[in-house]
Amino acid sequence: MNTKTRQALLMLLCCCARVASADENALSPRSEVRFEEVLSVLKSRCFGCHGPKKKKGKLDFSLYSDLTSALLADDIWKKMRTKVEEGEMPPKKAEPLTVEQKEILLDWYKATFEAVTEPVPGPSPPRRLTRREYQNSLEDLLGIELQQEIAKDGFRYMRPPPSIVEKLLLPDPPGASGFNNDGSVLGLNEAALIKYLQIAQYAVGQLDSVKGARELVFGGHKEAAPLLESFLVRAFRRPVEKAETAVYLGVYEKSRAAGESFDRAIKDVLMTALTSSNFLYRIEAAAPGASKPYLVSDFELATRLAYFLWSSTPDDELLRLAGAGKLSEPTVLSAQVQRMLKSPKIREFSRNFAGQWLGFRELLDSSVLVKGGNKLVKQRLAMHDEALLFFEYLVKANRPVLEILDSGKTYLNKILAAIYGVRGFRSPVAKKFRGREDAPDPLILWDIKDPNRGGYLTMAATMAITSAPQRTSPIRRGVWVLDKLLGTPVPDPPPAIPSLEQAGGGRRNLTVREQMKIHASKETCNKCHQHIDPLGLGLENFGPMGRFRSKGIDAAGKLPGGQEFSTPAELKKVLKSDFQGQIRRNIVVRMLSYALGRRLRYYDEPVISLLARDLEKGEDRLHLLIEGIVRSVPFQYRAPSTAKINGTGVKKQ
Amino acid sequence: MRDAYLISRRTLLRGLGASLALPWLDIMSPALGAAKAKPPMRLGVLYKGNGVHPPSWDISGTGETKFELSPLLQPLAAQRDEVLFLSNVDHAAGGWSHQSSAVAFLAGTGAKGKALDRKQPITIDQLIAGRIGDRTPLPSLEMTSDGIFLPEPITSYISFDGKGRAVPRESDPQIIFDRMFRGLGTGRNQVRNLSVLDAVLSEAKSLRRKASDADQSRLDSYFDAVRDVEKRLKESSSPGKDRWTPTAKPDIRRPPVAGDLPTRVRSLLDMMALAFWTDTTRVSTFLMANSSSRIVFDFLGINEEHHYLSHFVRNAGTKYITHFNMITKWHLEQYAYLIRRLAEIPEAGGRLLDNTVLMFGSGMKHGDYHSGRDLPLVLAGGKNAGLKMGRWLKYPKPQPYGNLLVSMAKAVGVKADGFGSSTGELAGLDREMNYDFGIKDDGSWTMTEKDNRLHVKGLLRPTNDLEKTNVYFVRLSDGSDVMIDAPFGNLNSRRVDHYVGRVATLSGPFKGSGKSRVVTSVEKIGP
């Protein structure tokens, strides 16, 4: 299918008449002129407190002395708009802004950040594979297993040993998106390059010891050229030019000339390819001279898809369809997404997306796992697996997205059933294992009757990661709800925070409730804690490991909006009814952000709105969201190469 | 210009034949370069996040050499002559935080954001590595014994390169060892790896030519890595003329598998010593606890997280102060170990320690208030750079923190004028300043009894017993001490800790008699 027809079809699907480019809107000469005016208002009226000297509230407007740096800080301007609009700033004791000054600031904000009304692709720089993506890709490419997965179908009862990849490579820190597949942070250094080489050496060494691996790579080939051609396409996830193959053939011939066997020489080439930036990075071809967003190639689409849903390299079917130019046909694409959702590899989506978003991945933190006794380790692994499998279930069964908050199902094993106090749980484990210390304890899908349970809000995994080692932390829990579920992260406490003790007049050993009361009495605290505290206290019925407790617990509360609740079940109800839109939007933002590997910006607003609207219309079904993202402009398009990097997607001056 | 560094590649690979027989980068191969007359100067940095409990950190005394170590500094008692304590060196900016203090520790200026997506200022260790790093196989070596604090990754790095990127840090001593001495294996494996590496480098070169400008900047770190590997290969086939040959045979042994935290930290410190000893690098940083560290020091019998304990005021509990102090003290014990280790290693008629500037510190002072004033800082070593140890430098006026970084760079032979927030060099590292501390024992430090109250004047300091957060001593003119043993609540409400290291006049009821009178409650306290 040619690009034009494809674009036409996509437009129909995307409900958007035109694909706009972020920089067209954001950087009109007018916007620049206006920014000069904005600067002069800031200098005369705001620098006194928010300038290089005082930096009140950690805000220093002088950092944004040109439009380019200003555009990077859209969240700052968003705050500025609210404060100026509501007359909160300048503070009461200062002279208010003139009508004209106010207009300059607000008009500039609107013209700059609200002018993007149509979907734009945003930046999509080359991204290094994350540690996990790299491991999965190696396994799928070579047909080997690097990770001994004891947790086949949830049958995990001990900690899997780290793979060579986990042993050697450092973990990837999350980027501004909150996910570690964020292109803005994925670096690499000399030590890592050597490690990639060492891992490649180990991996190709596995070809002969794992059944079927050699066949997968060598096929029936007896000659190097065709073998390499087919391997390089799979490894680099794109067609490979003759000249490129020739480079690799050169490596092969050199090894042969040095007296190596056919197999060994091929393996040398494989090692080379697996250490190449073409494999380690996802590089998309730039369209020279393009001034408008353009569709990515079918191979690039296959790659985006595979790393989005599988955290791995595209399989042969995706590559075949891409090679035939068919993958981007809407019906084919849709069928492929459906196929991918049914694949066992979809667990990686749950692991990497939900695991990072909802935080349950932290349960596998090795420092925690080496410390706990055997029982604690088993509990934490079970909690993790419940959270992992539950999301996988939601995805596979196409459940409504709001079930992350409340659901009638979850995964349980004996350990979890004990924590949850579920009576009558029967493990499917064969009788011969009963009573044995090493008996497998698989997780199975279970109907839960307890209205306080079900969904991530009250799941043991969530309760555990939001607790300190031996006590609950209502504040962490409140912050978790605000950030992870509602998508409204709380700012840091102000630097000169009055201590609870000072606030409490030197009394000590306050109860949690008393502490919270002190929060409420101080304006600086209350601004955030009025939101945090009731949510956190509402979950106090759950101990640090998620066990229900009621003795001495008062879980009743009232949200700032006036909604009252007295049990966790009621809190769930309130969130589900009154915060539905916010939760839905947050899920859209998180998943889109993960799919694109970047923090979402003001220019992504149109896509977010479209996806959220469609999701609501379609009974909130998860497949709708996943397919919507796959069909969205930023997933299908690339911004022209003039839209430069640094995460802006806008032209540099 | 861009490919200038690649010119040597062909030459280098031709020359590799000679080095192939040697284990990769084995610095112990015979006759590596000619021995230099003067050993190089190294810089080592140990960092702990979350600040300290100031009253337990602050030294009390009357002069540069007339002082008593504070409770937290006790681990350095045996090495008192090897260290230099700094007081009143600080970040000029107020409002310090967990996020800003890790970057600022070696950059001298605050961080941007919480994630690592923004360009951060270069840190002094990387500036130095950029200038002298090409003389050694590794420009610098970064390590940690902490994880990444996911909500604020910026707190988990203290080294940032010239492009504003966080420098990855290694936490496995065995991997660090391999990186230094074993990288590409031996024998046939090494030959194979080198030839594969050659192909990778060659491909990278052609890719670099083809990649669009926009993509280039993102592939930068890959190309930089390639360039650094080439440099190392070159170094291994023909060591630079500036490479130092150890004068004592290093003990090159792969460390055991790191189990618990104490073993790991010990091994990492050994690796830093070994790296300096073998001149594998001259710059190394060790993040022992990130600036919002959540480590649970269970091996010390502590079950709360480090960060939570550092908020000892707001989480109000005397047990927390004790536990927080135990952690800081443990970190100082590690520092003391490394000082001892470097002092044990002979080098060119002296000791490795004499040729190493070793710094310990935290990015903030008060763990709970996040203050950036009067940072907790200690220096050791550096004798051959002219540094004078065995002192307590308490500046009469706050000194810009950046000045310390500039002076440290100078000590290792690197000019860094204007770095960070600096205004010049930090005076006094190399000579006695004899500042007037404003604390003079004029003979009036005495105790008197009146109306059943004990009235005491003298120099206040806390007890060295970390378990006791309610015991202080007042030093009198006759050299004796009066003990204050009062309920924590009383001491806290009178802000007694505020007077640590200062001359205080206080009064209150007491028990006992004569020299062993003990103040049981502080009713009044003032200067």
Image (cartoon, coloured by chain):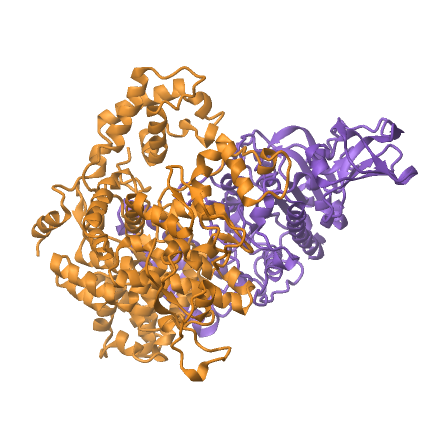
* Position in image of residue A63 (x %, y %): 40, 30
Comparing A89 with B401, the one in front is A89
For the point 38% across and 75% down, the residue is: A205
**From the image, which quarter does the C terminus of chain B lie in?**
top right
Comparing B34 with A178, the one in front is A178
* Position in image of residue B523 (x %, y %): 77, 30
Relative to B434, B313 lies left or right: left
B297 to A70, vertically: above or below: below
B156 to A211, vertically: above or below: above
* Position in image of residue A271 (x %, y %): 35, 68
Q: Which quadrant of the view contains residue B503?
A: top right
Q: Which quadrant of the view contains residue B255?
A: bottom right
For the point 31% across and 33% down, the residue is: A71
B234 to B189, vertically: above or below: above
Comparing A438 with B29, the one in front is A438
Q: Residue furthest right?
A: B514
Relative to B202, A630 lies left or right: left
Chain B colour as displayed = purple
Comparing B40 with A39, the one in front is A39
Chain letter, colour orange in render: A
**From the image, which quarter does the N terminus of chain B lie in?**
top left
Asked whether the viewer can see residue B231, the reply is no
Asked whether the viewer can see residue B268, the reply is yes
* Position in image of residue B502 (x %, y %): 75, 31
Q: Which quadrant of the view contains residue A645?
A: top left
Q: How many marks?
A: 0
